[in-house]
Image (cartoon, rainbow, N blue to C red):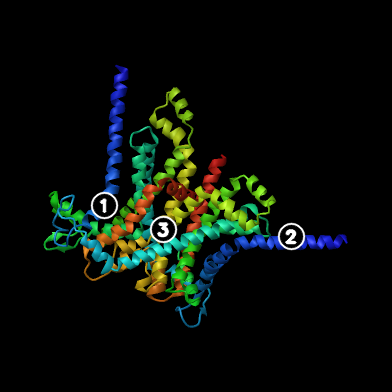
Amino acid sequence: MIANKYLIQGFFKNTLLHIFLLTVTISCLFPIFWMVRSSLMSNATIFVDQSLLPHEWNWHNYAVAWTKGNFGVYFFNSLIYTVSVVMGIVIISSLAAFAFSRLKFPGKDALFYMFIAAMMIPLPGSFVPLFVLMNKLHLVNTRFGYILCMINVGLSLSILLLKTFFDKMPSDLEDAARIDGCSRIQIWWHMALPLAAPALAVVVIYNSLNVWNEYILATLLLSDNNLMPLQRGLMVFNGAYQVDYPVLMAGLTMTAIPIVAVYLFMQKHIIKGLSSGAIVG
Amino acid sequence: MLLKTYNRYTATRSLDAFKNFLFVFPAVAIFCIFYIYPFFELFNLSLHQWQGIGPKVFIGLRNFQELAVDKVWWTSMGHAGYITLIALTFQNALAFALALACDREIRLKHFYRLVFFIPPVLSEVVVGILWNWILNSGMHNGQQIGLFNNFLAQIGLPHLIHNWLSDPKTALTCIAVVHAWKGFGWGFIILLAGLQTIDRQLYEAAKVDGAGMWRTFWNITLPMMLPVIVLVVILTILGSMQVFVLILSLVNQGLVYHTEVPVTRILGAMSGTNQFGYACAQAVILGILLVTVSFTLKSFSNRIKQA
């Protein structure tokens, strides 16, 4: 009797809990689902047809977005920026983290704390002096300028993540390599980097997300349509006089899907990276 | 002889140190140029009057004096404060409730965890444009464009149809809700990670002692979670007070008075009216405010940890 009561109570509680969780789940997924669905509708049906799946799958919108909407160029630019910034960060931050963890030089601690302090201090509006500086250096409207700025954005956290990892790594192997006559740079390249693969995965994914989703620096630094990444391109398209909703939704989907796919495949690394980033910040 | 060896020894050592320093050089160089220099330039420019070109005029604290009586600026602060308040209460309560639910032995919890973090990985631009369409109040051939208004019409509540984003009374709340939709997954993930570090034996012991659900929550979960909660509170404040890309993309008529927040003011002063000095003064004030709040909260949480 008592057992029964508990069972019923437990079942009731769990059902309520699932209803709550499912409601939130639906509210998370439905807008995204509706975005993808609408990207396959035609201009004639998009506001009229209320069915969950379109009767005719209108892939044409993607072709229009890609060519006429200039999203092909934006997509390509986003790819260039993401790949080059992430590669830059991996090399520069792993070199620095390796040195902070293993090598000796004067001012080491002070320099390291400088990077950490930068993460702790929120700096709203730092884009104003940054824009002034880029203007002075003639790096406005260049891919190189934007890439350098974005490398700087990801540097601190990446150095911290990698340094923590190197600190925990046993140094026996490196000592052996050193005795065998390996130089520091060889040890970094042949031992430290391969061994740090798990931490590097976090660095790569965290920074890819960051660069792919970045908007404000892209807006300030890149006014040439041929240099804009997706986020900026979306705003340009959205600001047009008459918005073509199915094509806009196709553009949104193109921007969102790669990042959601990466997240779904690599969620463990992402959550680890983002929450460690949050904890330092 | 001995001195010579010593000299050679220090020479190789300093050469060594120099070679070691080369490892951090690229990072330090980029960091100094793109972070440290703008950091000081921000303070420097805030003391000048400058149009972006031409000579900079040193005017001392005049920008700050002007800022102190700038009504639009303080209203924008108020707007961001309102968004932050909703994020702190509504959004974080939701995140905590979801984290508590997913901390139990419950089916599908990995699925839920996966889903709740999808909105945070989307960009603010995507979220803003998508919700702009959902909350749109435009008409097309007698049909509501916006999904929400359309839905209201369908279920027979057409009198609730509203121009959500252009009415000053509802615009800010809509922004706060969309901001919460995008952001609650953050708090959820951090709080869940915190909950999972609590020793299960504590719960068992409480059960043996006959403590109910509420007592367990008040006496075990909440005190154990306090540092994590403070962390989430700090992150929420920092995130919400600096929100603006979401607003730019959500309210696409551009910068409107009733949806101004501090960062849109900074951006407006810079690229709208070319008052670079004034923009920097605003940034300095907001930065000082945020640093003060987050460090106060952090020291508060440290003191509790020690007690």
The residue indicated by pointer 2 is: B13
Disc 3 target residue: B241
- Disc 2 residue type (three-letter): Arg
* Residue A230 picture location, percent across and down: 34, 64
Residue B303 vs A58, above or below: the answer is above
Q: CA distance from mark 3 to mark 2?
A: 49 Å
The kind of residue tagged 3 is Met
Residue A195 drawn at (x, y percent): 55, 48
Query: Are tags 3 and 2 found on a single chain?
Result: yes
- Judging from the image, mark 1 belongs to the subunit labelled A
The mark found on residue A31 in the picture is 1
Q: Is residue B166 visible?
A: no
Residue nearer the viewer, B112 or B206 = B112
Above or below A164: residue A64 = below
Secondary structure category for the residue under label 3: helix
Q: Secondary structure at mark 2?
A: helix
Q: Quadrant of residue B16?
A: bottom right
* Residue sitting nearer the eye, B147 or A51: A51
Quarter occupied by residue A142 = bottom left
Q: Residue at x 38, y 48 (%)?
A: A265
The image shows residue A82 at horizontal and vertical percentages of 42, 61
